Image (cartoon, grey):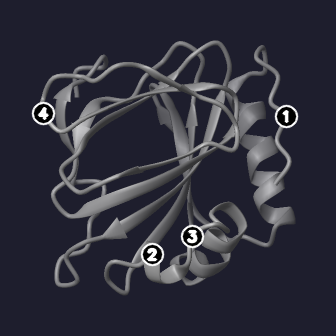
């Protein structure tokens, strides 16, 4: 997926470009949310998880990616100079690959934020269940492919499975 997102582009135009690129790759978007104060996301049909993983994480075998039988692919969009909450999850691990823009990522095994890592397109990072993490938009729009690895087959993760330790937007 070839994304070259200019910094000055308006949010709606960024989402239009990403939607067009996903359509060109034959991915089915089942939910698009551009209302988040930090940017937004695209949820891809879970039946396409294997194709999504092959496209964005070709260096990982499905045996490595799959913890349970459920995987949820997404595209995260983080605006310049915005950041997601400092958070963790009880029922999922996450794999990210930076697709466009240099983004900041902080991780830690404790509630104290770790050092800022600047990740360039092509970089891959994995967070275990319970690992604290934060995605940060730096000088440009950051586009990140994400797979949720559901860790509890009886109770898959959802948007409610976010424990926010700090949030710029009071959530």
Cα distance in 3D space between marks 1 and 4 = 35 Å
Cα distance in 3D space between marks 2 and 4 = 25 Å
Which residue does the image show at 64% across and 25% down from the upper left?
A: 102
Report whether residue 122 is seen. Answer: yes
Q: Are marks 3 and 2 in contact (CB under 8 Å)?
A: yes
Cα distance in 3D space between marks 4 and 3 = 27 Å
Left or right relative to 155: residue 158 = right
Neighbour tally class for label 4: few under 14, some 14-19, many 20 plus, Cα within 10 Å: few
Image coordinates for residue 81, horizontal then vertical, percent:
53, 12
Cα distance in 3D space between marks 1 and 3 = 25 Å
Image coordinates for residue 80, horizontal then vertical, percent:
60, 17
Which residue does the image show at 33% across and 78% down from the upper left?
A: 67
Which is more toward the observer, 23 or 151? 151
Mark 1, residue position: 4
Q: Nearer the viewer, mark 1 or mark 4?
A: 4
Count of numbered labels shown in the rendering? 4
Looking at the image, tell me whether mark 1 or mark 3 is earlier in sequence order: 1
Mark 2, residue position: 64
Looking at the image, tell me whether mark 1 or mark 2 is earlier in sequence order: 1
Q: Disc number at residue 42? A: none
The local secondary structure at tag 2 comes to helix
Looking at the image, tell me whether mark 2 or mark 4 is earlier in sequence order: 2
The local secondary structure at tag 1 comes to loop
**Residue 171, picture quadrant:** top left
**Residue 152, picture quadrant:** bottom left
Task: Please determine whether, in this image, residue 132 is positioned above or below residue 11.
Answer: below
Image coordinates for residue 15, horizontal then vertical, percent:
71, 40
Mark 4, residue position: 110
Mark 3, residue position: 60
């Amino acid at each position: 997926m070839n994304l070259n997102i200019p910094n000055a582009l308006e949010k709606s135009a960024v989402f239009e470009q990403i939607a067009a690129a996903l359509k060109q790759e034959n991915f089915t978007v089942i939910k698009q949310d551009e209302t988040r104060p930090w940017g937004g996301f695209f949820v891809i049909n879970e039946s396409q998880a294997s194709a999504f993983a092959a496209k964005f994480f070709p260096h990982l075998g499905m045996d490595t990616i799959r913890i349970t039988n459920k995987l949820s692919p997404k595209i995260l969009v983080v605006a310049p100079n915005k950041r997601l909450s400092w958070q963790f999850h009880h029922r999922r691990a996450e794999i990210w690959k930076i697709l466009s823009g240099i983004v900041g990522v902080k991780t830690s095994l404790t509630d104290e934020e770790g050092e800022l890592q600047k990740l360039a397109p092509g970089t891959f990072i994995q967070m275990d269940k319970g690992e604290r993490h934060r995605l940060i938009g730096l000088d440009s729009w950051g586009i990140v492919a994400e797979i949720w690895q559901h860790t509890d087959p009886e109770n898959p993760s959802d948007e409610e499975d976010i424990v926010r330790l700090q949030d710029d937007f009071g959530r």
